Image: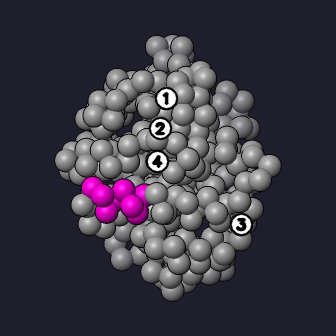
Amino acid sequence: MKLGYSTWGMPTVPVEIAIRHIAKLGFDGIELTVIPGYTTELSTLNSSERQRIAKLLKDHHLPLSAIAAHSNLLATNKEDYQKNMWRLKGGVDLAVDLVEDGIMPAVNTTPGGSPNQWEELKSFLVERINELVDYAKLRGVTIAMEPHVGAIIDTPDKMRECLDLVDSPYFKVNFDISHFDVVGFTIEEAVAALAPHSIHTHVKDQRGRHPNFEFLIPGEGDFDYVTYLKEMQESGYDGFITVEVSMMVQQRKDYDPLAAATLSYQTLSRAFAEASIER
């Protein structure tokens, strides 16, 4: 397994500074965020900017593990849906443009919606996922769905049912264990359920139980990363373990995106060492 960092936690940081800092810390890869409000928002990434980013990644020996293009697949307004699908399909095209050394980035998204809509809207959701997956398949890119607390897909059972309904090798899981930890799943339960179907991951730290919980920077809480890493290795997962700093943390008045990356690296690199897992 390798250790990655998502620019989700760096919305205002210029991409050259983000890449340099993440590489200097020692991370093995990076996830690039392309949603509105970020310095790498998709509409700003013209051909020359893509070439510049590709060179930055190559110069810093930092593979791109994923594109964070999170967009609501259940938007009912036609204009909103078209915009969201444009971003997701654009994320697929960006993955192809930035592929390096045979490592094709996944395109990550959350589904939208709320938990009580599953039975009512799952067929509608699958229809829209299929549209995206069909596009991604033609380009050799995998779509990674992230089950999310409070979203229509919020349990392992729903995610596995969705995988069965879509039934494509180009549709897998972006496994963020924090969303299961805050509702009471053990590490062992969550990993056994979803790691075999995962192409990418996120980790945070967290405290409390839904609905009274907070996400934290790795190292601020007491999540057992050592056990998590051992369980992921035992499951056969060999991809990136990618740190994601949540919007909840970013709302702090004193939030420092570079310091958050530094603490995250210290915490996770130590956990890899304590778990005796080579990167």
How crowded is the residue under tag 4: few (<14 C-alpha within 10 Å), some, or many (20+)? many
Please give the label number shown on residue 178: 2
Asked if the magenta segment contains residue 71, the reply would be no
Q: Would you place residue 54 above or below residue 241 in this image?
A: below
* Segment colored magenta: 268-275
Q: Secondary structure at mark 4?
A: loop
Residue type, label 4: Val
Asked if the magenta segment contains residue 272, the reply would be yes
Question: Farthest right residue?
Answer: 253
Marks 3 and 4, Cα distance to the nearest angstrom? 21 Å
Residue type, label 1: Val
Q: Main secondary structure of the magenta part?
A: helix
Q: Would you place residue 48 above or below residue 85 in this image?
A: below
Q: Secondary structure at mark 1?
A: loop
Find disc 3 in the rendering and name its residue: 13
Q: Percent position (x, y) of residue 179?
A: 48, 33
Whether residue 274 is visible here, answered yes or no, is: yes
Please give the label number shown on residue 108: none
Question: Is the Cβ of the residue at disc 1 closer than 8 Å to that at disc 2?
Answer: yes
> To which quarter of the image does residue 139 belong?
bottom left
Find disc 1 in the rendering and name its residue: 182
Q: Secondary structure at mark 3?
A: loop
Question: Is the Cβ of the residue at disc 1 closer than 8 Å to that at disc 3?
Answer: no
- Residue at the (54%, 14%) spot, across then down: 116
Using residue 151 as the reference point, say whether residue 190 is left or right of it. left
Q: Would you place residue 113 above or below residue 227 in this image?
A: above
Marks 4 and 2, Cα distance to the nearest angstrom? 6 Å
Q: Percent position (x, y) of residue 33?
A: 61, 57
Find disc 4 in the rendering and name its residue: 203
